[in-house]
Amino acid sequence: MNGLQIVNIHRSFGEISALAGITFDVVLGEIVAVLGPSGCGKSTLLAVIAGLEVPDRGEMLWDGKTLTEIPTYRRGFGLMFQDFALFPHKNVFQNVAFGLQMVKMTEPEIKKRVGETLQLVGLPGFEKRDVNTLSGGEGQRVALARSLAPYPRLLMLDEPLGSLDRNLRERLVLDLKSILQMSDQTALYVTHDQEEAFAIADRVVVMNAGQVEQFDIPERIYRQPASIFVARFLGLTNLIQGNVRQHGDTRIVDTAIGEWPFDGDYTGEVTVLIRPDTVHLNADSQCQLSGIMSELSFRGATCRIIINVNGVPFTFELPSNMDLPREGENIQLCFDPEEAIQLFPKSN
Ligand code: ATP
């Protein structure tokens, strides 16, 4: 296989198992996001791939060849951190040229490559600018140009937008994606923000406590989270206990707030997820969920509502152009169980 393969990587620090059997791959030209909460092992994973940490066991391959014995500087990987620290006493040109001088490019080649990368990141002609006069977004682009300039085989970005405010991040993540795609750059993008991961990545590795919970395309991770952890991490918090029982030829899942047909092949205790974006108001269906409106927040095209069903809060999203009950009033919702419900067997 061409690109990066990570196979069953382990790394412990004393009692702490920072990486406990990580397996995934990044094909050439692909952007893979590593997504997980603080302390799940993301930075350790990057350090191991970069060669800054040595794994206890497992295998890492590039284009099918082992990386284990290859020192950091010969792996040809680039790194960009959250606090990307541009050199304050050098101008933009000197910052971007830094890595190119290291690999002993000639002066005319360096000049050409710096111009190209500044063009690529949308800052043509910025060569002479003092880096202390740049805005947050411009500084981030210069740091990106500096990382891209030496043609890294793999670019690893560790929370590169973490220090910027939300609005700027939302805009820059899309710019970043198109810059990486335009340069056909293979990239590994570390973040704890699922919206950022989904916006930028072709595939996402969801990590928890040193392990991979799910590795898939963003749509499938959102539509079919592989575990309760993934569901919760994505903000899918409508989770209740249930029990699946056989009922004639079909199976039914019973919960404290309703029972619905279930098209699966197991019975017994389960956790039931009701997706927040699949309910309708007062539609004609048997799957009604009746509760008290306890919170409503307007978000533009959609409204986020919290309803209280038998004392349990559930969060849903509805189009904002409909007449919704006020807080404290009754609300009736319905959904198609096949679309709205996912079950996690007890062992999950
Ligand atoms: P964050 O998002 O907060 O940066 P992370 O997902 O990058 O977190 P890591 O920094 O990789 O997580 O840490 C994983 C675990 O390993 C944590 O429990 C951390 O305390 C531990 N750890 C990491 N480096 C070391 C070290 N050098 N010595 C001891 N423990 C470490």
Image: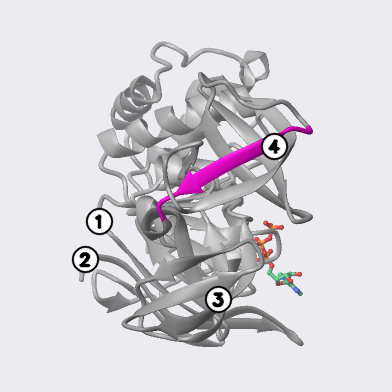
The residue where tag 2 is placed is: 2
Secondary structure of the residue carrying tag 1 is loop
Q: Provide residue 321's location: percent of width, then percent of height.
A: 51, 18
Residue 330: which numbered mark, if any? 4
Residue type, numbered disc 3? Gln
Mark 4 is surrounded, within 10 Å at the Cα level, by few (under 14), some (14 to 19) or many (20 or more) other residues, namely: some
Residue 53 image-quadrant placement: bottom right
- Whether label 1 touches label 4, CB < 8 Å: no
Q: Tell which of 167 and 270 is nearer to you.
A: 270
Mark 3 is surrounded, within 10 Å at the Cα level, by few (under 14), some (14 to 19) or many (20 or more) other residues, namely: many
Secondary structure of the residue carrying tag 3 is strand
Quarter, ligand 1:
bottom right
What residue range appears in magenta? Answer: 328-336
Q: Residue at x 64, y 37 (%)?
A: 331
Q: Provide residue 228's location: percent of width, then percent of height.
A: 58, 68
Mark 2 is surrounded, within 10 Å at the Cα level, by few (under 14), some (14 to 19) or many (20 or more) other residues, namely: few
Q: Provide residue 98's location: percent of width, then percent of height.
A: 49, 37
The residue where tag 1 is placed is: 28
Residue type, numbered disc 2? Asn
